[in-house]
Amino acid sequence: MIKKMKIQAALWGIGLLTVGCGSINIVSTPIENIDAVPLKVMALTEEERQSWGHADLLTDTIPGMSVDRAYEEIIGNKKGNTVIVAVLDSGIDLDHEDLDEVIWTNRDEKAGNGIDDDGNGYIDDVHGYNFLGEAYNEQLEHARILRLNLGDEALQAKARKKLDEELKEARETRQMILSTKQQTEQILGIVKQSHEAVAKNLGKEDYSKEEVDAITTTDSNFQRNISVVQQMFNYGDSLPEVIELIEGDIERADEGLAVYNEKLDYHLNVDFNGREVVGDNPYDFSDTDYGNGNPSNRVADESHGTHVAGIIAAERNNGIGVNGVANNVEIMSVRTVPNGDEYDKDVALAIRYAVDNGAKIINGSFGKSFSPKAEWVYDAIKYAAENDVLIVHAAGNDGNDLDSPENVNYPNDHKNGEREFAENLITVGAINDTYGSEMVASFSNFGSRNVDVFAPGGSVYSSMPGSEYKFQGGTSMAAPAVSGVAALIRSYFPKLSAAEVKKILMDSGLSTQLSVVVAGDPAKSRSFDQLSRSGKIVNAYNALIMAQRVSDSKVKLP
């Protein structure tokens, strides 16, 4: 009871406990003495790991967004409006067992007839649109700049410098992984051979170290086998277990090689042209007759959009898979992001498509450091703002301070200047599942001006193609968590504008002055409340309380 009172005392100042207080002072005092509070110190259970982003700091001692508490204490059986959330991403598995009931359907379009039935300019867009055609692998933008000689000499020099640095790192890392894999394979061969010899001698596969120690032999080769096996007991309780661990290392090395092979074959390859199959000119905004009405994923590895969609709106309480943050949501699939950098034209047209077809929230879990046609995207963001559509954007995974002019991240709402040109875009950094000095994900970008909020993204369990599920981490996972909370607000308080929803998300979160490590470097530790404009973690419970007060005109947002 004393522990709970201490937690309550610490959390009162940040507005988590506001019901019955008579006011909505959610943005008052940050947590001062949270380290004195007995928070979660044990490793999370598998069940907790799979749903930690929905947990509550008070009741679960896990830094989630209080989603479950919001449903239990605020939403209950209330009926909200349906909210369309456009996922601008890779293709989505539209038949996934945990998504098939929440996929948006354009009821004015007839599937497969090759006709633009609703006259919106897009043929057969029953569940969204595919701006990538049959393309998948792509270059990064700085490689495209060099291949196509885009921009002036300064831009090309900057692109060349970045490309050369990344090529060097990719080649060196690939070679290191390859060498490590080859050495590990040699070790595995020796361990397996030694294990087989000892198992044959003892007449069984599963034996103890004591049994091995008791073996006597004058055979020098067999003595070497025994010595190898004895050493392996330092790494596991049995040889089959150790062999499985070594095989796991080889499997992870193969995964790492695949990543760097993709970088070298596609992302950083100046000679690769992944757009050719689409047939358009991606740097001509008037060339819009391309793509098709099938926004599903093309290959099993094209999983990003499916994972993002599940975080937002996987079917809740259906006994399978995961629970999305939001109910009352329809997911509009807009295939926009290839395995490489997205094109500015695709992003701009995708935003406009989402707005014109009823989306009230757009999730953008993508980003890049070069944007030759950024104005096209800026104009689309303004168009979304004019039509009251909120855009939720991932801050990026480079561990960079986005306030530094050297660390530009596109798209943004400030054109790399001091002032925001729109009030409908919110940028999201990522936190881990344990409160403490390492709460901020090591990969997450940050910035007291150019990141707005933080949300769970360190390792998030969600849907994957083929009705599978998996943990993935990134600000790409934090953004849809916020999109889900935004969807809850827009569902139950539909009178609130996109700008008001953004402000509520920022003002109602949980803050702390705890010193946290950024970019995985303890030397770069900062107070958490200095890492974003709000200094806060998005909190669904608080957000709905504030949304109610603002909607009832009891509170005015600054």
Image (cartoon, rainbow, N blue to C red):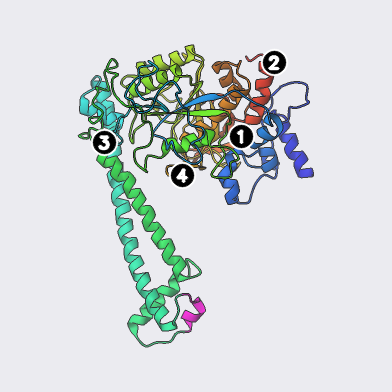
State the residue position of label 2.
552
State the residue position of label 1.
65
Q: Amino acid at mark 4?
A: Ser
Marks 2 and 1 in Cβ contact (< 8 Å):
no
Report the mark closest to the observer, 1 or 4: 4
Q: Quadrant of the C terminus?
A: top right
The magenta stretch is 206-214
State the residue position of label 4.
467
Marks 2 and 4 in Cβ contact (< 8 Å):
no
Q: Earlier in the sequence, mark 3 or mark 1?
A: 1
Name the residue at 75% across, 27% down: 19
State the residue position of label 3.
164
Q: Quadrant of the N terminus?
A: top right
212 drawn magenta? yes
Q: How far separated are the C-alphas under marks 2 and 3?
A: 56 Å
Name the residue at 33% across, 81% down: 221
Q: Amino acid at mark 1?
A: Met
Q: Secondary structure at mark 3?
A: helix
Whether residue 425 can be seen here: yes
Report the mark closest to the observer, 2 or 1: 2
Q: Amino acid at mark 3?
A: Asp
Whether residue 525 can be seen here: no
Q: Earlier in the sequence, mark 2 or mark 1?
A: 1
Q: Amino acid at mark 2?
A: Asp
Q: Earlier in the sequence, mark 2 or mark 3?
A: 3
Marks 3 and 1 in Cβ contact (< 8 Å):
no
